[in-house]
Amino acid sequence: MIHANGVSVFAGERMQRLALSEEDKSVRDWFIQTMKDLKCEITVDEMGNIFAVRAGKRKDVPATFIGSHLDTQPTGGRYDGILGVLSGVEAMKRIDELGLETEGGIGVVNWTKQVSIRNLEGKMLTHANTPMAAHFELHIEQGPHLVSAGQRIGVVTAVQAYRWFRLKVIGRDTHTGTTAFEHRADALYAFAQMMVCAREVAAARGCLASVGIIEAKPGSVNTVPGEVSFSLDIRGPETDLVAEVEKELRKDFDAIAAKEGAGIGKPCRVEWTLDFDSPAVKFHEDCIKCVEQSAHAVVADAPVEDTKSLVRSIMSGAGHDSVFTSKRVPTSMTFVPCKDGLSHHPEEFCSADDCATGASVILQAVIRYDRSRFS
Amino acid sequence: MIHANGVSVFAGERMQRLALSEEDKSVRDWFIQTMKDLKCEITVDEMGNIFAVRAGKRKDVPATFIGSHLDTQPTGGRYDGILGVLSGVEAMKRIDELGLETEGGIGVVNWTKQVSIRNLEGKMLTHANTPMAAHFELHIEQGPHLVSAGQRIGVVTAVQAYRWFRLKVIGRDTHTGTTAFEHRADALYAFAQMMVCAREVAAARGCLASVGIIEAKPGSVNTVPGEVSFSLDIRGPETDLVAEVEKELRKDFDAIAAKEGAGIGKPCRVEWTLDFDSPAVKFHEDCIKCVEQSAHAVVADAPVEDTKSLVRSIMSGAGHDSVFTSKRVPTSMTFVPCKDGLSHHPEEFCSADDCATGASVILQAVIRYDRSRFS
């Protein structure tokens, strides 16, 4: 079993390493040097994505990759993304120690902050100097599914659909002390009703709807806000379900806006802007099989009666670098449990044992995939 | 009838003259010079409040004042506060032109931004070098009461009670894509329910409850906000009613918070901080009578059958400099109609006719009060 010591190198109470910041540059330098020491060839593309490849026997085929991102969310934790790259580094160390000779090359990629990748996803994957055979990613789970069931490994088969919107509610700013409720076109009150409505509509379809960002203008204690902007994140297991929730909310939000301010003949109105649309993703069967077989092999000597029960199939609720690679190359992911299923949070925590188990699964999955390509 | 030409000097599409800014300094300089030219003696206290007094026959008695503020809200209009001081300037011009000899002195005061006054209200009025006999203030109405009834003058008899709070809802930030609704402690969702609840509770008691400022942290599209801060402004005709609304909302908000996050044993909680408490104010009978008599006198030659109907008693929904002066000296206010009853807004508008009518009422009221003191 591999000990993912690397994780502790980056441990800290809080973790903020924004893409292309000073801290990000340090860890990138570390990554490049470490991978060079492990006999990897380094390529950096115009987005700052770093590809480290250890050559295999066959020089004319693309490498099989392990990848994720070393940069973090604005208030991120120590595992989201970072564990995925470090598991690649550890896998490469193990391959190097064992002197393993693979068929094709094996690579580790550090993707620059997910949003940038999205903007250039087509360019990145079709024109990169470093083509890929497949992409595997290890990640802490995001939601307390494994941890609450006492399971060790999640074989990720799919990623739910999601759409991100920016909405603007336009009302009228008036004095809080002198404007009766029926004379108001209170954009923030309309927003409040919309948010309550969104949860209800999404829940009825087994979907999620969330607001993460809100701004109310002009922002004065005694002025009714005349303009509110907010983000809306709709997710669901199927692309069509997300579209249904959107359609219903467009109707409901219009109705809420129309009512607020109707008393003065100046109803609120609401504008939608689609920022990002990610249809549901089904990962590649071959990759899923490699992860599944590796997971069962890794937990085989665990001290429980039915080791098979330690592994489960799972759908990812969140977007990942793998969502984008999956559009171009066979891809799948592996989840490991984490405390309370918490991610994108300074308190996120994954035990050293779980990190190591995940890293072992990823290593085995890559080796299995490499062999299966030429058998 | 006085023509309040001064108003046009300051007319502009938008108006932002924050207290103690460069723009504020210019208008203060203008005010001081203008009042000196009208034979006033100037005193400036440590808060920057400017007192301009034209002496009367009796040197040993405090002057009767007209006052308001020349600075504006962050996105204010051209009339809020400004009209009050300019009506004083115009009154003084008229007194000077007519060579009127008053019993006590007549003064005009430009108060520095209301918030500062509040902080030092006791100090200001007990220790100022410029004691006051009474304080009269002309203001545009704030709410479309006069304008929608076709009335010309509001005799302000009282100001409603209000309390300003800052609230903080503490939940837990988690990933929007992977955290089921029942596993969330979504501080923004709790806020949304609170805002909907607040309107209902306030309306049931004939009060108002408003949120003007909101901030959600950490502020990321795919993170459920773990902390939300917002302002809450509760107003009502009686101090006790405002207290009742507060009491009910404290109970209801606690219940809303307790429910959100209960599924994971980590419910939201809510913290209240009282920022400002202004009990209901009843203006002084003598001052109200002076304004009322003056109002009827000014509209007496209006081309309508029942000129009395052009004047009405009114309660102010908003705080004003007069709320603070009323704690120490006899005080009352005069309202004039404005477009849509809109104030604290770049679009606020009061016709030159209405400005002039208001200024005439204020001048007469001050003269009446001055005479009544010694009759």
Image: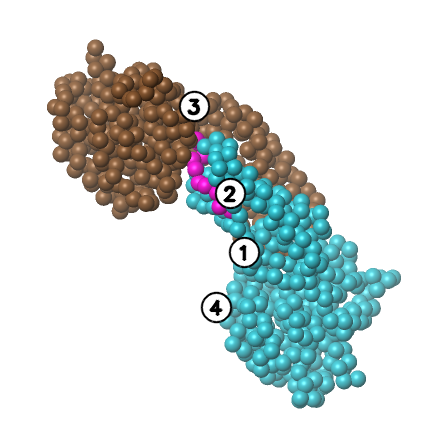
Chain colours: A brown, B cyan
Q: CA distance from mark 4 to mark 1?
A: 33 Å
Percent across and percent down for residue A154 are 35, 24
Q: Look at the numbered disc 1 and give the secondary structure of its residue.
A: strand
What whole-number distance in Å separates the C-alpha atoms at marks 2 and 1? Answer: 17 Å
State yes or no: residue B177 in magenta. yes
Query: What crowding class fits label 1: few (fewer than 14 Cα within 10 Å), some (14-19), or many (20 or more)?
Result: few
Q: Residues within 10 Å of mark 3 (few under 14, many from 20)?
A: many
What residue did someone put label 2 on?
B268
Taking the image as shown, residue B254 lies to the left or right of residue A367, namely right
The one nearer the camera, B89 or A70, is A70
Residue depicted at x 58% and y 82%: B129
Segment tinted magenta in the rendering: B169-178
User: Any mark on residue B273, and which?
Assistant: 1
Residue in the image at 17% along x and 33% along y? A35
Amino acid at the residue labelled 2? Cys
**Decide: marks 3, 4 in contact (CB < 8 A)?**
no
Pointer 1 indicates a residue of which chain?
A: B
Q: Which callout, 2 or 4, points at the residue further toward the start of the chain? A: 4
- Residue density around tag 4, few if under 14, some if 14–19, many if 20 or more, within 10 Å: few
User: Label 3 lies in what chain?
Assistant: A
